[in-house]
Image (spheres, rainbow, N blue to C red):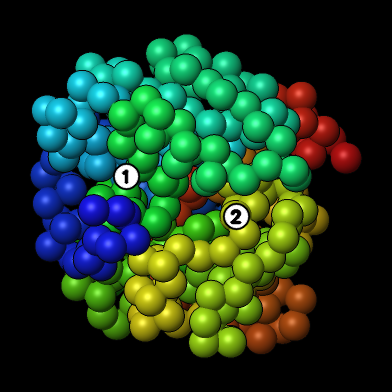
């Protein structure tokens, strides 16, 4: 069975993933910031997945998928393709579950992410993201080596695992009016939607992606999956070309809206996290908060979030320090 012939995950799958991850994944903190609340006239609740194992929410989906491998699959090992966070998540999950891991990474991936992936014990194979097809490379390697391919987002067990971040947030803060979630391939957003539908159906879930990589927004408007060739943005975790065949229908059916932010808005959000909240957040991890700032109408004066309770998933904190320091200093 391929991942594309698998059934769509449900909330029951998210709840089962939460049990599977209990005592393995960190139950990350929900942080507040009075200064931000006062500035926006809303109450914000930041689910800090930058403090998750491997520095991002991706550990949830990776471990949930690998923990369901058969004995034969574990012996063969796992293969994936990823620019960084999913790579690290698969590598650590494979080490914890005592199986081999092979990661296909772009040769221009962040040095820190590639080094961390190797440090967790995975083998790394690089490719040129502008001239080579990572999925084709991965499928061929999986066949040759007898490994099981677990893609970064378009897999039911990955989606269900990612949804546990929103599940934890909604259990801790059950009466949210809005939930803002970043998206690249849509695994975190799809999983969050499954959790919100079950636990807080009144909560409006907003997806946020880079303005230059707005394939999901275009897909939502067009009514079918739209692909963007090589989107350019500092949010490297959201440089996916399209939604998946599993993530798209969940997002299409349940999301309130998908909005976009510029790289400059992301940099401003990074500075707020560093300066006000004293936490390190990668550009992709700042998407949801940058979306809150844009949606709250600071520029337009339309205070759409005034008086509302707003959840924000801070998806990751794996920064290249040299690059990060430039963002903060510019």
Q: In the picture provided, is 94 more to the left or to the right than 218?
A: left
Residue 242 sits in which quadrant?
A: bottom right
Tag of residue 240: 2
The residue shown at (66%, 86%) is 302
Tag in front: 1 or 2: 2
Sequence-first tag of 1 and 2: 1
- Position of the C terminus, as image quadrant, is top right
The residue shown at (56%, 71%) is 216
Tag of residue 26: none
Residue 298 sits in which quadrant?
A: bottom right
Above or below 43: residue 68: above
**Looking at this view, is 292 or 115 the one in front?**
115
Task: List x then y, in percent, for residue 320.
Answer: 68, 28
The residue shown at (56%, 78%) is 219
Task: List x then y, in percent, for residue 235.
Answer: 66, 49
- Does any portion of residue 300 appear in the rendered image? yes
Q: Secondary structure at mark 1?
A: helix
Above or below 313: residue 66: above
Instruction: Count residues near mark 2 (Cα–Cα under 10 Å), then give few for <14, some for 14-19, many for 20+.
Output: many
The residue shown at (82%, 33%) is 326
Which residue corresponds to mark 1?
Answer: 61
Above or below 111: residue 222: below
Give how far apart the Cα atoms at labels 1 and 2 are: 17 Å
Task: List x then y, in percent, for residue 207.
Answer: 51, 69
Above or below 236: residue 115: above
Q: In the picture provided, is 321 more to the left or to the right than 82?
A: right
């Amino acid at each position: 069975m391929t991942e594309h012939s698998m059934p769509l995950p449900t909330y029951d799958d998210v709840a089962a993933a939460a049990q599977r991850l209990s005592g393995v994944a960190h139950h990350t903190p929900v942080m507040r910031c009075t200064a931000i609340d006062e500035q926006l006239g809303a109450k914000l609740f930041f689910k800090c997945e930058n403090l998750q194992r491997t520095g991002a929410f991706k550990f949830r989906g990776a471990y949930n998928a690998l923990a369901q491998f058969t004995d034969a699959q574990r012996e063969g090992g796992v293969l994936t393709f990823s620019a960084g966070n999913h790579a690290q998540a698969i590598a650590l999950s494979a080490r914890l579950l005592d199986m081999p891991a092979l990661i296909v990474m772009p040769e221009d991936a962040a040095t820190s992410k590639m080094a961390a992936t190797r440090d967790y014990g995975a083998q790394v194979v690089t490719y040129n993201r502008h001239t080579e097809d990572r999925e084709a490379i991965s499928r061929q390697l999986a066949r040759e080596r007898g490994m099981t391919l677990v893609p970064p987002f378009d897999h039911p067990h990955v989606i269900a695992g990612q949804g546990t971040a929103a599940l934890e947030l909604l259990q801790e803060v059950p009466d949210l009016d809005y939930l803002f979630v970043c998206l690249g391939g849509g695994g975190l957003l799809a999983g969050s939607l499954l959790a919100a539908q079950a636990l807080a159906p009144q909560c409006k879930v907003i997806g946020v992606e880079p303005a230059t990589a707005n394939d999901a927004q275009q897909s939502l408007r067009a009514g079918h999956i739209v692909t963007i060739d090589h989107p350019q943005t500092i949010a490297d975790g959201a440089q996916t070309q399209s939604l998946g065949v599993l993530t798209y229908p969940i997002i299409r059916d349940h999301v309130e809206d998908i909005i976009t932010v510029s790289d400059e808005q992301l940099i401003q959000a990074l500075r707020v996290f560093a300066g006000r909240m004293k936490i390190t957040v990668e550009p992709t991890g700042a998407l949801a908060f940058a979306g809150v700032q844009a949606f709250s109408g600071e520029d337009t004066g339309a205070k759409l979030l005034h008086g509302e309770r707003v959840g924000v998933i801070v998806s990751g904190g794996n920064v290249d320090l040299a690059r990060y320091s430039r963002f903060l200093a510019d």
